[in-house]
Image (cartoon, helix red, strand yellow):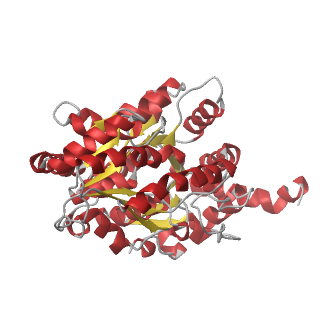
Amino acid sequence: GEGRLLESLPMAAINNAGALGIVLLSPSLDLKNGIGVYAARLAAELRRQDPRCVVTAAADLLPRPSVPRSGSDWRGREFPPRWADPLLLALDAARPRLVHVQHGLYIGHGRELARFLVGLRERGIASVVTLHGVWPPSPLRRWPSRLYRLLADKADRVIVHQAAGALKLLEDHGVAAERIAVIPHGTWTGDEAARSRVPEAADGKTVLFAGNIFRRKGLHVVLRAFPEVVRRVPQARLLVVGNERANNLLDRLYLLWLHGRMRRGSREGWLLRSRGYVPDAEFTGSIAGAAAAVFPYLRRYGSASGVFHHVLAAGRPALCSAVPTFAEAIAAWVGRLPELIVPLGDVDGWSRSLACVLSDDALRERAAAASRELGLRSSWAEVARMHLRLYRGLLAAGGVALERAGGLRTRRRGGRRGGSRGRGG
């Protein structure tokens, strides 16, 4: 499975002159979060596309001192507060040509990452940062503009997953378009997708909500809409699969309120619940057995959804909120399948769309075909090719600096042996 895709590799393999040595800075798969799964799947496809591409995880070079408590994918930091210098020392030995950072709270906020990116530049190591979420500008929230401009200045390129959603937001923050690359989230194809492509459940009326549960995922909107769906389609059932995030007091208060909302569905028999993280086979089986999947997200920031791409791979109808996360789906579907796009937070709209999709077999078939079509545009094979083109372009553009990198690293190591101890420690 995914857990073996980012295996530890010997430093000699990274150092091989003929290899394209890449270090991925990403969450450990032990945390069972979407960014870690994304990084692992990307690494596997990069290796498949180019046998010379040697990819390893930063955690294999710098063992983590501790693992955050279980129960949430972002509870606590995975890396210590001062991780940049130890990791740079490890990279001096590994000598990769490029470091690709999958940005997230597991490494803390931007200051330490900025120090790390500066250290990479001093060593002649190319750097890329993928932003898995981009917040919009706001008078009350100033940190996104500072962070995004800082990353665009220190890294060789910033990657976002969407042109219509995240790219525009970054430009609104003042990041120049030439510093940004748009590469979609990957979609599973071939045998991986086939595991989810079994006939839907016999009653054909199960609706799936899957993923990490917190307020901005909008599960409560569908819970409020579903009694009306059941009135119109009596066989309708809502299956909720996923872990409940409890990172802070607001999360916990939301879950208490949400549980109250869920009691009616449990009592009336239309709500089915599978708690916590489920095995891959159960997850893909849940998608395969669903008549449709729902994404009632309330988040206004640009991001991608791994669960959404699993649903596309399985060829299941996907109903989405009209938010930046689903910008490409909105552009592709709103004209010919308007039932699949629901205004943000519109309970009545969700009731109407779900009842329509569940009661119209022909509409479900068209929606399923639309999912498969959209998924083919962002296959993992194509996503890996786009990454490799970006990597090679950056390395070619910085070739002179990279040729000097070995001497620069030698001088830095010499400086540490002599003068660095005088700065403390």
Count the marks: how many?
A: 0
Left or right placement of residue 378 versus residue 9 in this view: left
In the rendered image of this protein, does residue 46 appear above or below residue 363? below
Residue 54 is situated, as x and y percent measured from the top left of the image, at 43, 67
Say if residue 335 shows up in the picture. yes
Residue appearing at x 60%, y 54% in the figure: 256
Quadrant for residue 87, please give it: bottom right
Quadrant for residue 161, please give it: top left
Q: Nearer the viewer, residue 320 or 423?
A: 320
Residue 341 is situated, as x and y percent measured from the top left of the image, at 29, 37
In the rendered image of this protein, does residue 358 appear above or below residue 22? above
Say if residue 327 shows up in the picture. no
Q: Nearer the viewer, residue 39 or 62?
A: 39
Residue 310 is situated, as x and y percent measured from the top left of the image, at 31, 58
Q: Quadrant of the N terminus?
A: bottom left
Residue 177 is situated, as x and y percent measured from the top left of the image, at 44, 28
Q: Quadrant of the C terminus?
A: bottom right
Q: Nearer the viewer, residue 19 or 132?
A: 132
Left or right placement of residue 415 versus residue 124 in this view: right
Residue appearing at x 70%, y 48% in the figure: 112
